[in-house]
């Protein structure tokens, strides 16, 4: 597929990729190390329409030619596809199980967590990391989290989850060392839920 | 620190590694944090020091460090040994980063074989240099087999090894690299830290990252994670103790190094953590050899 796209219509990425990707990564690392804590990525560049700013920052920081990406059908637009192609160069996959990263815009229509790659018994790191866009990281039904990275317990009240989603997350944890890892974004904000986190 | 900075003409990329390598290491760090204690493979690069000199720790630091960080590097607890000084100067030069010997002031602490005496805090990252990431390697040489043992949580061999130690020596004789269980799932080597430091791994507020450059593995312990040192009900885990106190600062509960002073066998015991010891001396604490030339203050009294 070699569709020539108009560079003038590709939105900007990081203006200083080295410094900015480092700043975003430190917040991502803290988020993965401290499940349920919310981080602000408002310094990141404006991504194309349909993508949240925090999701764009994750893509610019982690996606490249080594990471097959599953893209939500709602993001199959020229603006998003061209932007990801130009800035990340990540191969696209249609099959969730082949994805190193999945970018989910509409959780209600997305495949089940169990449909993505949960890794290999000997190499559980070869699993999908989902970046899930939500209307808000607060204001939804409250759940309590425990596990590595959490001092006694933490709470999370994600808004806009599909019915039964916390059950899927519990199942994802129950099959540890297998599992997918979740990054939730809403606008400029981000929080993470690795497979090691228990929902109580 | 007076190392020449890499500005304005930069001969290497910021923090030495190229951006694609950093992305690869960063992805491995995230998976390592998500699966605490699991050894994630990564594409270890050639570094400007040989394997065995801390290339795993250097690559981890290079992937996470930014100009706002404050960097500390210790070797066997000491800030002033050759390896620690060289690595600290390396990052001062290639990452334009402030350096310190003060444990509390550092945001990233890279370490070879010790955990600082002073408790770490949230927001700090402790980067371990690891020679052999596989705790089972001394018992099983084949990576394919140790991988399977971790995959199926088949750790009987490790307990047999501890039992053999009890049968031979009357106690669990291992003193460094003492095996740990992370969140009751993965067996993990804590790197060759003395078992004195093992209790500091448990429920630590800092992020603990482990890098093995030659063996091409990264693993991690997130903050507030259960880290249990293996033992038996009738042979519980114990740390080292000393009859002596630190000869310079008088500390009674720090990890001590034995230093031979002359040909007649005179010796002293002194804190391995040089920053901890000099802080105590600056605060007025004095040990039995406080007047010794080795006790010259490298910090002004408080």
Image (cartoon, coloured by chain):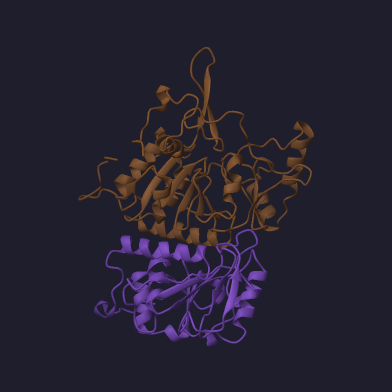
Which residue shows up at 58% across the image and 28% down it?
Answer: B244
Query: Relative to residue B108, is residue B87 depicted above or below?
Result: above
Which residue shows up at 41% across the image and 75% down it?
Answer: A189
Asked whether B264 or B149 is in front, the reply is B264
Residue situated furthest top in the rendering: B264
Which residue shows up at 61% across the image and 47% down it?
Answer: B199
Q: Quadrant of the C terminus of chain A?
A: bottom right
Question: How far from the left and from the top, in percent, is residue B299?
Answer: 35, 36
Asked whether B115 or B146 is in front, the reply is B115
Relative horizontal placement of residue A116, taking residue B105 as reference (left or right) = right
Chain A is shown in which shade? purple
Relative horizontal placement of residue A61, taking residue A138 as reference (left or right) = left
Q: How many marks?
A: 0
Question: How far from the left and from the top, in percent, is residue B40?
Answer: 55, 56
Q: Quadrant of the N terminus of chain A?
A: bottom left
Query: Relative to residue B124, is residue B276 depicted above or below?
Result: above
Asked whether B276 or A116 is in front, the reply is B276
Asked whether B285 or A91 is in front, the reply is B285
Q: Which chain is brown?
A: B
Question: How far from the left and from the top, in percent, is residue B32?
Answer: 54, 58
Question: How far from the left and from the top, in percent, is residue B95?
Answer: 32, 50
Residue situated furthest left in the rendering: B8
């Amino acid at each position: 597929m070699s569709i020539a796209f108009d560079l003038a219509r590709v939105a900007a990425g990081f203006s200083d990729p080295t410094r900015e990707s480092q700043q975003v990564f430190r917040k991502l690392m803290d988020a993965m190390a401290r499940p349920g804590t919310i981080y602000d990525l408002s310094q990141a560049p404006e991504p194309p329409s349909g993508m949240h700013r925090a999701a764009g920052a994750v893509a610019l920081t982690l996606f490249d030619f080594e990471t097959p990406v599953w893209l939500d059908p709602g993001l199959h637009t020229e603006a998003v596809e061209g932007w990801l192609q130009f800035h990340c160069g990540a191969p696209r996959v249609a099959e969730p199980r082949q994805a190193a990263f999945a970018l989910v815009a509409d959780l209600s229509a997305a495949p089940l967590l169990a449909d993505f790659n949960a890794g290999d018994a000997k190499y559980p790191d070869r699993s999908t990391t989902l970046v899930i866009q939500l209307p808000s990281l607060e204001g939804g039904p409250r759940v309590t989290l425990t596990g590595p990275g959490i001092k006694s317990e933490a709470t999370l009240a994600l808004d806009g989850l599909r019915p039964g989603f916390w059950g899927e997350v519990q199942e994802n944890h129950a099959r540890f060392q297998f599992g997918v890892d979740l990054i939730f974004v809403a606008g400029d904000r981000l929080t993470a839920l690795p497979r090691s986190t228990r929902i109580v | 620190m007076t190392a020449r900075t890499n500005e304005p003409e930069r001969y290497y990329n910021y923090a030495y590694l190229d951006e694609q390598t950093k992305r690869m290491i960063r992805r491995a760090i995230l998976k390592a944090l998500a699966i605490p204690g699991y050894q994630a493979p990564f594409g270890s690069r050639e570094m400007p020091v040989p394997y065995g000199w801390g290339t795993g720790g250097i690559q981890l630091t290079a992937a996470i460090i930014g100009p706002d960080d404050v960097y500390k590097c210790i070797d066997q607890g000491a800030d002033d040994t050759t390896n620690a000084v060289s690595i600290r100067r390396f990052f001062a030069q290639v990452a334009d980063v402030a350096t310190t010997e003060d444990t509390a002031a550092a945001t990233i602490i890279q370490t070879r074989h010790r955990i600082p005496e002073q408790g770490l805090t949230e927001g700090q990252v402790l980067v371990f240099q690891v020679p052999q990431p596989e705790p089972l390697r001394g018992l099983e040489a084949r990576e394919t087999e140790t991988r399977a043992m971790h995959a199926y949580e088949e750790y009987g061999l490790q307990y047999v090894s501890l039992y053999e130690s009890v049968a031979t020596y009357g106690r669990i004789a291992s003193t460094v690299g003492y095996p740990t269980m992370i969140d009751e799932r993965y067996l993990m080597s804590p790197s060759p830290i003395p078992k004195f430091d093992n209790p500091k791994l448990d429920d630590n507020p800092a992020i603990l990252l482990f890098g093995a450059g030659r063996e091409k593995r990264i693993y991690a312990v997130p903050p507030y994670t259960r880290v249990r040192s293996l033992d038996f009900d009738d042979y519980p885990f114990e740390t080292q103790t000393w009859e002596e106190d630190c000869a310079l600062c008088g500390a009674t509960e720090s990890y001590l190094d034995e230093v031979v002073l002359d040909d007649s066998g005179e010796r002293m015991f002194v804190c391995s953590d040089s920053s901890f010891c000099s802080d105590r001396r600056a605060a007025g604490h004095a040990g039995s050899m406080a007047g010794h030339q080795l006790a010259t203050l490298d910090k002004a009294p408080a």
